[in-house]
Image: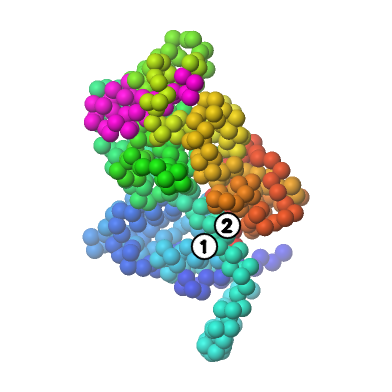
Amino acid sequence: MTVKKKKQTEVSVNDLKDGMIIAAYTSFSSDYRPMDKSTSDFIRHNFRNTRAIIRRTGNKQDIPIKFLKTGDELLRIHSLPPTLKKLMFVNKALAKELKKRGMIGFQVNLNKRIADESRRDIDLKELIKQVEQTSEKKSRKGLSVIQEKRQQKADIANKLISKVSESLEYRREATALVENTMDLIRKGKTSIKEIKLFTKSILKNASTDAMTALAGLKHSDHIYSHCVDVGAIYQSTYAKIIEKKRVRNVFQNQFDVFMGALLHDMGKSKIPKEIIDSTEHYERNSRATQILRSHPIFGAEILAKMNMPNSIINMTHHHHVKLDTAMLSSYPTGVDFKDVMFETRLLSIVDVYQALVGKREYKRSWSPPSTMRYLDALAGIEYDLRVWEPFLQTMGIYPKGSLVKLSDSSLGFVMNVPRPGQNLEKPLVAIIRDSRGEDLTHHDIIDLSVEKGVKIAKDIDSQEIFGDNALEVFTNISVS
């Protein structure tokens, strides 16, 4: 069998075509000359294991991408590994995102068919230009409303997927900082300076909406990444909820919202680390359980010494207090539920949600939808129904990133939460496996609110189907 040779050529972002394979990124906008911290962080996080040609202090260097620094001038990204196929295989969504990011020149591999098409494009350039000039108005009308709406839905999905991928490294670094901070507090050094600085970076560069989806796709531990996930989910939902309820925002800014939730378990820094890091299940009346139940009191004391706002202290102190304070699972004891702030009541729901969806090595996780059903059953019993209802409307019955099986036996990931007034059971779903059980390389988006013959049959824990590759499967989705 004869192997067709691939032709390599230089193209601009406007000339990228489906089927091209990017071998190197060769030209960039002025944002990359030199790069600020946000831009260099973005390149390092998204182009892992590649190499870059840069200009630093006037000298041109070829370096591993992980050594990229703020202030470098980016000239070329090359040596892309197979794991970055989502940044190599060209489709309309990728081309649009690259253009938005200021990546404007590429070295691509072309097979013969695409090379011939490219030559024809050059030959017909003038003709096309004339046609566009005389029929621009007609062309605009020619794009159907259905096509426009479909593209809008594809953009929603691709944006979420891209943001989940970008947010992964921020989550990892934040998790390490939480662990380090707790270790320092355990040694008597009560400082959260590093967490504060990094939280600002997360809010600037990452997406807490995407991190909320990430919480159900990625392994987490029972304390450090749990704190980060709770912070992200809380920050993502709180502002939407108070806007719907038209109640006063007690926080000064979004930074305080994230920090207030992230710090909720800081009292565990006073618990012996062998208990905190243990994967053993402790009996309800065991000594270890009693020690663990003291963490809200310890946390309130720590944050009070740091002069944190009373609202954040209330969140830390009361996030395990239940609607029925007489329940054995409600602690600290002796608390009147009236003293538990609205913000804390929301935190208690977010805390349990993450604990159940968190994919830990030592326990079977719950799918996000099954967790929402469980919490719904406890609303009005353990959790304030007036807080649960807006949380449900914000997170959806099928939170973003949920894996679902449709009535036609296809599998897909949920990409949005239907807007207020729409049916929460009918989100956008990106199909990754067809009804015959075959994994797809080109993914379709289905809007269940308009597809009358298809509905969600059941939700599935993504790890049951894809194991540890669930996140990779999700981030490799490309809807066009």
Q: Image check: 439 left or right of 128?
A: right
Q: Is residue 262 above or below residue 422?
A: above
Number of other residues with Cα within 10 Å of mark 1, as a class: few under 14, some 14 to 19, many 20 or more: many
Residue at which label 2 appears: 478
Residue 43 lies, in percent from the top left, at: 39, 55
From the viewer's side, name the closer residue of 46 and 267. Answer: 267
Label 1 residue SS: helix
| Residue under the point 28% across and 25% down | 302
Mark 2–mark 1 CB contact (< 8 Å): yes
Number of numbered discs: 2
Residue 8 lies, in percent from the top left, at: 52, 70
- Dominant secondary structure (helix, strand or loop) of the stretch shown in magenta: helix
Residue 34 lies, in percent from the top left, at: 29, 62
Q: Is residue 382 above or below residue 309?
A: above
Q: Earlier in the sequence, mark 2 or mark 1?
A: 1
Question: From this viewpoint, is residue 68 visible?
Answer: yes
Going by the numbered disc 1, the residue's amino acid type is Leu
Question: From this viewpoint, is residue 226 visible?
Answer: no
In which quadrant is the N terminus drawn? Answer: bottom right
Residue 26 lies, in percent from the top left, at: 41, 67
Residue at which label 1 appears: 94
Mark 2 to mark 1 CA distance (whole Å)? 8 Å
From the viewer's side, name the closer residue of 37 and 58. Answer: 37
- Magenta stretch in the rendered image: 298-325
Q: Is residue 134 above or below residue 16?
A: below
Quadrant in the rendering for residue 235: top left
Label 2 residue SS: loop
As for residue 371 lying within the magenta part, the answer is no
Going by the numbered disc 2, the residue's amino acid type is Ser
Number of other residues with Cα within 10 Å of mark 2, as a class: few under 14, some 14 to 19, many 20 or more: many
